[in-house]
Image (spheres, grey):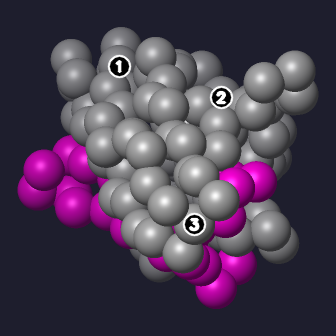
C-alpha cells in the first residue's frame, strides 16, 4: 500500500506563502490514483482543497483557494505539491494528503490512504 507523508507546514503571516509536499512512501502513486489535499480547522469538518490526477493534466480546486493555491506533481520524485500563496487567517488548518482510485475527488470518504497531516497557521 502507498503511505502519503506530508511536510512543509508552519507559521506564516497573512499574505505569505508556503509549499506543502506529499511524498509517497512504501509504493509509488499509481497511474490510476488521484492525490488530494484536504484541510480541517479546529471544530470543523475536513474539507476538500485541491486534487490532481497522477496521470494526465487534470487538477481541481475548491472555490476558496482558486487563484491562490496551485497543485502540481513530480512523477520522478513521487511527490505532489501544494503551493499556497496570499495566505489568509482562514486558511489555518491541519492539511491532509490523501490518495484515491475511484469516486468523487472532493469527498474525503473516497480516499483510501491518508497522511498524518501538517499544521498550517496563518497569523493576521
Comparing marks 1 and 3, which lies closer to the viewer? 3
Identity of the residue drawn at 88% across and 28% down: 44
Q: Earlier in the sequence, mark 2 or mark 1?
A: 1
Q: Is residue 109 above or below residue 16?
A: above
Q: CA distance from mark 3 to mark 2?
A: 30 Å
Disc ID at residue 3 = 1
Q: Are marks 3 and 2 in contact (CB under 8 Å)?
A: no
Report x, y in % for residue 23: 26, 37
Q: Is residue 76 above or below residue 3?
A: below
Report x, y in % for residue 117: 49, 25
Report crowding for label 2: few under 14, some 14 to 19, many 20 or more residues within 10 A (C-alpha): many
Query: Magenta span covers which residues?
Result: 66-91
Residue underneath mark 2:
111
Q: Is residue 113 above or below residue 86?
A: above
Residue underneath mark 3:
14
Report x, y in % for residue 55: 40, 63
Amino acid at each position: 500500500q502507498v503511505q502519503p507523508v506530508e511536510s512543509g507546514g508552519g507559521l506564516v503571516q497573512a499574505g505569505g506563502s508556503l509549499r506543502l509536499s506529499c511524498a509517497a512512501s512504501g509504493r509509488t502513486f499509481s497511474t490510476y490514483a488521484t492525490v488530494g489535499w484536504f484541510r480541517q480547522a479546529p471544530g470543523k469538518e475536513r474539507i476538500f482543497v485541491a486534487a490532481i490526477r497522477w496521470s494526465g493534466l487534470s487538477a481541481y480546486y475548491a472555490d476558496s483557494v482558486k487563484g491562490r493555491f496551485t497543485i502540481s506533481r513530480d512523477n520522478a520524485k513521487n511527490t505532489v505539491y501544494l503551493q499556497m500563496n496570499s495566505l489568509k487567517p482562514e486558511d489555518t488548518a491541519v492539511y491532509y494528503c490523501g490518495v484515491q482510485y475511484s469516486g468523487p475527488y472532493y469527498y474525503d470518504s473516497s480516499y483510501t490512504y491518508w497522511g498524518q497531516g501538517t499544521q498550517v497557521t496563518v497569523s493576521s
